[in-house]
Image (tube, rainbow, N blue to C red):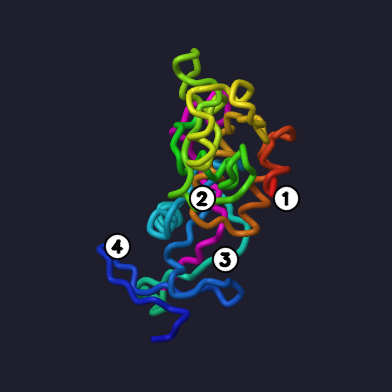
Amino acid sequence: MNPSALEIWPENKVLSVEAAPDSHCSLNLLGQQSLRTDVSGMPLEWIDYREAVRLYYTGQVAYTCGTTLYKVRGGTNALTGDPSFIEVNSIVATIGHSGHAGATRGTYIPPLNNETLFRRDNHLCLYCGFKFPSQQLSRDHVRPFFQGGKDIWNNVVTACRRCNNAKAARTPEQAGMQLLAVPFTPTYAEYIFLKGRRVLADQMEYLLAHFPRSSPLHQRLRHPLN
């Protein structure tokens, strides 16, 4: 089989998917997600190729930008005899409203989980400054629970298990440990980035433009702590 095309036969009658000539997709191209935005350009969510095709087909796509990821081919037009296809872009703007009420108002507080926390801190232990794989990292509460600390973004940092054990149920000051960066709550656009499995360069540039100017992620992405 041609390595630039994958044959698939789901219930939605898509016959094949081909990588765009100028894209760098390979056999795992179907795992590459598109960034969906609203018509004003506000990032909303990541969508797979099936959802992207549905949006194109139902006329919900207002415009697209970024690179063309792949071409989804369907059947043959019964009237013209021409093959039908849809080109899916890396960024897709859609009509309608977001299902997340706070996404455009700045009131949204994203759910806290270790996967996005570790990505926020670039997989660095914010005490020793070394990078670790996820299985060697943990969630540390800067102010421990028994001292009134809460399990919220502004009170948690990524820590390697060794540093977390050394700090124990103390504040960094009490443990004589220096915190290398101040924890913060991601905005909706920042959270969308943190949830991305594989963010392409054009998607990253687009998301960065929606980060607050004061966002620590600007510095962390360009100049990691280590």
Q: Is residue 115 above or below residue 185?
A: below
Cα separation between marks 2 and 1 = 18 Å
Q: Position of residue 2 (x, y in %)?
A: 43, 85
User: Do callouts 4 and 2 mark residues in contact (Cβ within 8 Å)?
Assistant: no
Give the residue at mark 4: 12
Q: Earlier in the sequence, mark 4 or mark 1?
A: 4
Q: Position of residue 145 (x, y in %)?
A: 45, 18
Rendered image: mark on residue 196: 2
Give the residue at mark 3: 68
Cα separation between marks 4 and 1 = 41 Å
Dot 4 amino acid type: Asn
User: Do callouts 3 and 1 mark residues in contact (Cβ within 8 Å)?
Assistant: no
Per the rendered image, the range of residues in magenta is 84-109
In the image, 171 versus 210, the foreground residue is 171
Dot 1 amino acid type: Arg
Task: Choose mark 2 or mark 3, whichever is in front.
Answer: 2
Q: Is residue 163 above or below residue 175?
A: below
Q: Give the quarter of the figure containing the N terminus.
A: bottom left
Q: Is residue 185 above or below residue 48?
A: above
Dot 3 amino acid type: Thr
